[in-house]
Amino acid sequence: MKPRRITLIALFAAMTAAGSIVKVPLAPVPITLQSFSVLLAGVILGPVEGSISQVVYVITGLLGLPVFSGGGGISYIMKPSFGFLLGFMCAPYAVGLYLEKTAYTKARIFIACLIGTSVIYLLGMPYLAFYLQYILMKPDAITFSIKAGMLIFLPGDILKCVIIPMVALPIRSMVEGNSIWKK
């Protein structure tokens, strides 16, 4: 992997960390801008490098740097929102894989972002429900996790999926068209 591609990977890891700074603290999962850069990483970097950028982000946080919305450290594994971080690592792969097999149009990027958002929910929601049921002993864990872990986020996540194609196409053409960023 060329140093320029490594720089892009680091940039997307840093963008995800920066997205955790702007947050609306809701229990048990805060609203942040992180998923925007997670999905954008899959569009711009592709499946492998997009996922690597998020693995770098998660490892950085688990090693103790306060890059997560609630800080950092290995104990973050025991936070109710950790499952969404697992989704962050897998979502760019799903986004990039879908786009590898098709043309980069606004409509297809939108669909890819919906797929990536679904991956985040598919990994985050069961973890949240498990945490609520078995750690906090909440009797209505599944219902609460759907309300607090998905329904309040859905409108914003769909909006992100609408905005990303508008932002991604110019960035992607700049990155791919500029020989210094090519693989």
Image: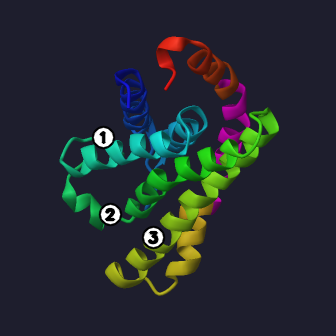
Local secondary structure at mark 1: loop
Residue at screen point 42% across, 83% down: 133
Q: Is residue 4 above or below residue 26?
A: above
- Which amino acid type is shown beneath numbered disc 2? Lys
Mark 1 touches mark 2? (CB < 8 Å): no
Q: Residue 79: which disc?
A: 2
Q: CA distance from mark 1 to mark 3?
A: 20 Å
Q: In the rendered structure, which amino acid carries the disc numbered 1? A: Val
The residue segment tinted magenta is 151-167
Please tell me whether mark 3 sits on a helix, a strand or a loop: helix
The residue singled out by tag 1 in the image is 67
- Numbered circle sitting on residue 135: none
User: What secondary structure predominates along the stretch shown in magenta?
Assistant: helix
Is residue 105 part of the magenta span, yes or no? Answer: no
Q: Is residue 160 visible?
A: yes
* Residue pointed to by mark 3: 128
Residue 130 lies in what quarter of the image? Answer: bottom left
Question: Which residue is found at the position 53% from the left and 71% from the top?
Answer: 145
Dot 2, how many residues are within 10 Å of its Cα: few (below 14), some (14-19), or many (20+)? some
